Amino acid sequence: MNRRYRKTIIAGNWKMNKTISETKAFAEELKPLLGKPKWCEVVLCVPYVNIPAAVRAFKDSRVAIGAENCHSESHGAYTGEVTVEMLKEAGVKYVIIGHSERRQYYNETDFTVNKKVRAALDAGLYPIVCVGESLEQRELGVTMELITYQVKVALAGVPADKMRHVVIAYEPLWAIGTGKTATAEQAGEVCEAIRAVVRKLYGARVARSVTIQYGGSMNARNAAELLAQPDVDGGLIGGASLKAPDFVQIVNAANQE
Ligand code: PGA
């Protein structure tokens, strides 16, 4: 973390978990435990149908609500899809784009990710853009090339002045939902490389102000060590965001002056 230049952001990714009533109950449990974190932004990305309930339940708190996906078109015949304008009007601030599960199960590519990122930014949303390598790619030694490519394509056509809304999440596929976390050094190394790509594209000032998260089996035990890396500015948390006490412990690890 480097709070002098950029925001620290802890974001939960609920994936396909919790109903509306469970969302409300979670909010009532979380709010008193969380208090008002001063040094980091807290986000909960929830299933579409839970968004109105989450926005209402966290209205009087510092928790911002995010979506887990969006479509890139503004309207049309895309059965089952949701536009960025719909999310914006529902009170959403952040939207996860290009999560590896979307890439794996729903054929999202770096090019669809780029379209969604631009649509989200045009609507005034804050995209959390996910990048990451598979175990095979890491073992082949192509992690940095792949990440560079993913970041470059995701940000194609994004003007410098919109970059203050962009969050990048480094999520190695082999660490997601596996209980196998990247070491702090591995996470730090790739997050540093991502910042270097942003620096090449947009210059030093933009690069030092962009928030880069780590995601992949981040939990209450390993959060502090990961966040101690200078280029790891927060976390995208799956499993550990489903239980309020666990999530609060991660926020506390990030909420340090
Ligand atoms: P995990 O998920 O924390 O359960 O590994 C992270 C993510 O998919 O964003």
Image (tube, rainbow, N blue to C red):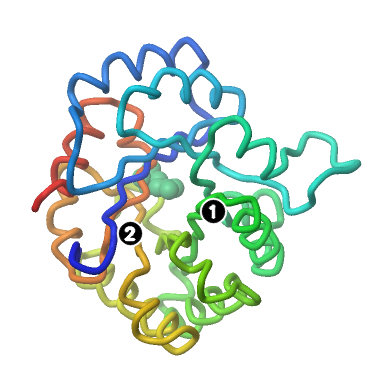
Q: Is residue 98 visible?
A: yes
Determine whether label 2 and label 1 are within 8 Å by CB: no
Q: Is residue 177 visible?
A: no
* Residue lying at the far left of the rendered structure: 257
Residue 192 at what x, y percent from top left?
30, 78
Residue 171 at what x, y percent from top left?
41, 60
Residue 194 at what x, y percent from top left?
39, 77
Residue toward you, 233 or 132:
233
Label 2 to label 1: alpha-carbon separation:
13 Å
Amino acid on which disc 1 is placed: His
Q: Residues within 10 Å of mark 2 (few under 14, many from 20)?
A: many
Q: Which residue is mark 1?
A: 99
- Helix, strand or loop at mark 1: loop
Total numbered badges shown on the rendered structure: 2
Check mark 1 vs ligand 1: CB closer than 8 Å? yes or no: yes
Image: 96 above or below 135: above
Assign the N terminus to one quadrant of the image: bottom left
Image: 178 above or below 162: above
Amino acid on which disc 2 is placed: Tyr
Q: Residues within 10 Å of mark 1 (few under 14, many from 20)?
A: many
Horizontal relation, residue 180 to residue 88: left or right? left
Residue toward you, 36 or 22:
36
The earlier-in-sequence mark between 2 and 1 is 1
Check mark 2 vs ligand 1: CB closer than 8 Å? yes or no: no
Image: 82 above or below 190: above
Q: Residue at x 49, y 39 (%)?
A: 66
Residue 118 at what x, y percent from top left?
65, 62
Q: Residue at x 50, y 32 (%)?
A: 46
Q: Which residue is mark 2?
A: 214
Quadrant of the rendered structure where residue 205 is?
A: bottom left
- Helix, strand or loop at mark 2: strand
